[in-house]
C-alpha cells in the first residue's frame, strides 16, 4: 500500500456485504473476502487471495462483515423515561403524541452534564450493536434555550444533528405564536449546532402549512429539511416532502397510492421505523409495497423514550423482515446504504475504496442471521473510522 497511514488488512471474512453498486447484487457480496484499511478509509476490497500487502493483519475467523449501521433517525437528548406510559399502552391505551410533553418537562429540568451523560450511554449502547453513524434530533426542549443546548449536546456525538423545535406545541401556547418562535429566535439559536430541520407533520402536532413555513425558514438559515409524516393517520406530510424534494421523509405508515407515487417520482427516501410499531401496536408500514413501486427505503431506530425506546438496528432489521415483508438483503441494505442516503451521505453505509472504514463483524456466517436470529447479540466487533472500538 502507498501513503503514510498505517494499513491493516481485515481478512478471514466468510461473507462481506459491500453495498457497492459496482458489484453484483443488491449487497455486492464477496465470499472469502478481505478489506484493506488505510487510515480512516477503505483502500481495497476483494477476495482474500488477492489482497495486497498491508502493515498489519486482523483475522475475523470466517465471520460475516457488514458496513456499520447508519441510524438516520433518533431522539437521544432527553431525561427521564415513559415506562408507565408504555405499560399502559400495552394494556390497551392508544398511543398519542401528547406524551412528548412529559419528556419535555424532565429534559428542561436536567443539567447539561446529565443530558450529555445520558446521550453518551445511548451512543455506546448503539455502537455495541453495530451503529457507526447516527442522526440525533432535538425536540424535547421546545424553548429557545433548551433546543439550542440540546443540539449543542448532540453535536458532541455526531455531525448529523437535527433541529426539531416543531415537535409539538407546548401546553398553554398559541400554535401560531409558537411557529413564529420556532422560525425566529429558536431557529437563530439552534442553527449553529444543526445540519437539518425537521417537523412532526401530524394530527395533534403541525399541519402541512405550518410544516412548509418551518422548513422554508430552515432552508433560509442553511438547514436541509426532513419530515415526520403519516405516522398516526393519512395526511399531507408525505406529499409535502415529495413536493419539496426532501431527501427523506420518516414513518410513512399510512400511505395512499398518491403518496407512494409521489415518493417514487420525487426520489424522496421513505425512512421506516419498525420499532415504533412494535412499541405502539400500530400497523407496520408496508415496505414491500414501497419497494415494488420503486421507492427507496431506509430503516432507522427512532430511539426515543415514548414511542420506541430501542437502540438496536439489528432488531429493526429483524422486524423489517418479519413484519414489513422485506427480504434479509433488502433490510440490511436499508439499514446501511439506505440510512446513509437518507442523510445525504455516500461515504458511509458502503464498503468500497474511499469510503469510511466502518465495519460491523457478526458472530455468524451470513447477514441473513441478523433476521434469522432476532434478539441475539450477533455483533462481535465494530470498527469506526478505521479503528476497532475495543471493549464495548
Image (cartoon, helix red, strand yellow):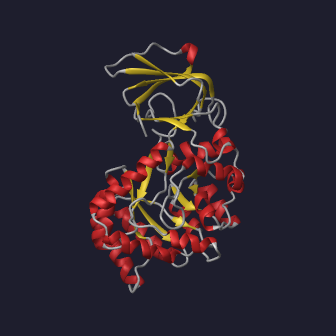
Q: Is residue 186 above or below residue 249?
A: below
Residue 243 coordinates in the image, percent (x, y):
54, 64
Reply above or below: 295 against 108: above
Residue at image x 62%, y 35%? Answer: 27
Q: Is residue 57 above or below residue 210?
A: above
Q: Position of residue 278 (x, y in %)?
A: 63, 61
Q: Position of residue 172 (x, y in %)?
A: 39, 86
Residue 206 visible in the shown view: no
Locate residue 93: give its quadrant: bottom right
Left or right, 326 with reference to 222: right
Q: Residue at x 36, y 69 (%)?
A: 107
Residue found 58% across the figure and 39% down from its top: 378
Near-viewer residue (211 or 189): 189
Q: Residue at x 50, y 54 (%)?
A: 247
Q: Nearer the viewer, residue 288 or 59?
A: 59
Q: Is residue 73 left or right of residue 258?
A: left
Query: Dividing the image into 4 quarters, which one contains the N terminus?
Result: top left
Whether residue 244 is visible here, answered yes or no, is yes
Q: How many marks?
A: 0
- Position in image of residue 83 (x %, y %): 51, 68
Of residues 43 and 261, the one drawn nearer to the viewer in this rendering: 43
Question: Is residue 295 found left or right of 6 in the rendered image?
Answer: right
The C terminus sits in image quarter: top left
Amino acid at each position: 500500500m502507498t501513503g503514510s497511514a498505517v494499513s491493516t488488512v481485515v481478512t478471514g471474512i466468510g461473507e462481506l456485504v459491500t453495498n457497492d453498486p459496482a458489484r453484483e447484487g443488491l449487497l455486492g457480496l464477496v465470499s472469502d473476502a478481505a478489506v484493506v484499511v488505510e487510515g480512516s478509509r477503505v483502500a481495497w476490497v476483494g477476495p482474500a487471495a488477492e489482497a495486497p500487502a498491508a502493515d498489519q493483519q486482523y483475522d475475523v475467523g470466517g465471520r460475516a462483515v457488514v458496513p456499520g449501521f447508519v441510524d438516520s433517525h433518533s431522539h437521544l437528548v432527553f431525561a427521564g423515561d415513559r415506562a408507565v406510559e408504555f405499560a399502559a399502552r400495552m394494556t390497551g391505551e392508544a398511543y398519542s403524541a401528547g406524551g412528548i410533553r412529559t419528556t419535555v418537562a424532565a429534559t428542561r429540568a436536567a443539567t447539561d452534564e446529565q443530558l450529555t451523560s445520558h446521550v453518551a450511554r445511548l451512543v455506546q449502547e448503539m455502537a455495541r450493536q453495530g451503529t457507526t453513524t447516527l442522526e440525533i434530533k432535538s425536540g424535547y426542549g421546545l424553548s429557545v434555550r433548551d433546543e439550542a443546548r440540546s443540539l449543542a449536546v448532540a453535536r458532541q456525538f455526531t455531525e448529523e444533528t437535527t433541529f426539531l423545535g416543531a415537535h409539538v406545541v407546548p401546553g398553554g401556547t398559541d400554535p401560531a405564536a409558537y411557529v413564529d418562535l420556532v422560525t425566529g429566535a429558536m431557529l437563530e439559536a439552534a442553527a449553529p449546532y444543526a445540519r437539518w430541520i425537521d417537523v412532526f407533520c401530524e394530527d395533534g402536532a403541525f399541519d402541512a402549512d405550518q410544516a412548509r413555513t418551518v422548513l422554508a425558514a430552515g432552508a433560509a438559515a442553511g438547514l436541509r429539511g426532513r419530515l415526520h409524516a403519516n405516522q398516526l393517520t393519512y395526511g399531507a406530510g408525505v406529499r409535502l416532502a415529495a413536493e419539496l424534494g426532501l431527501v427523506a421523509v420518516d414513518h410513512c405508515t399510512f400511505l395512499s397510492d398518491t403518496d407512494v407515487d409521489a415518493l417514487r417520482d420525487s426520489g424522496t427516501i421513505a425512512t421506516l421505523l419498525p420499532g415504533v410499531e412494535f412499541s405502539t401496536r400500530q400497523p407496520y408500514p408496508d415496505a414491500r409495497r414501497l419497494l415494488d413501486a420503486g421507492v427507496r427505503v431506509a430503516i432507522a431506530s427512532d430511539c426515543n423514550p415514548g414511542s420506541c425506546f430501542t437502540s438496536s438496528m439489528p432488531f429493526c432489521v429483524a422486524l423489517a423482515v418479519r413484519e414489513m415483508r422485506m427480504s434479509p438483503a433488502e433490510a440490511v441494505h436499508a439499514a446501511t446504504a439506505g440510512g446513509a442516503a437518507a442523510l445525504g451521505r455516500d461515504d458511509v453505509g458502503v464498503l468500497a475504496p474511499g469510503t469510511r472504514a466502518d465495519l460491523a463483524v457478526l458472530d455468524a456466517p451470513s447477514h441473513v442471521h441478523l433476521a434469522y436470529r432476532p434478539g441475539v447479540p450477533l455483533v462481535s466487533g465494530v470498527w469506526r473510522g478505521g479503528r476497532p472500538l475495543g471493549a464495548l
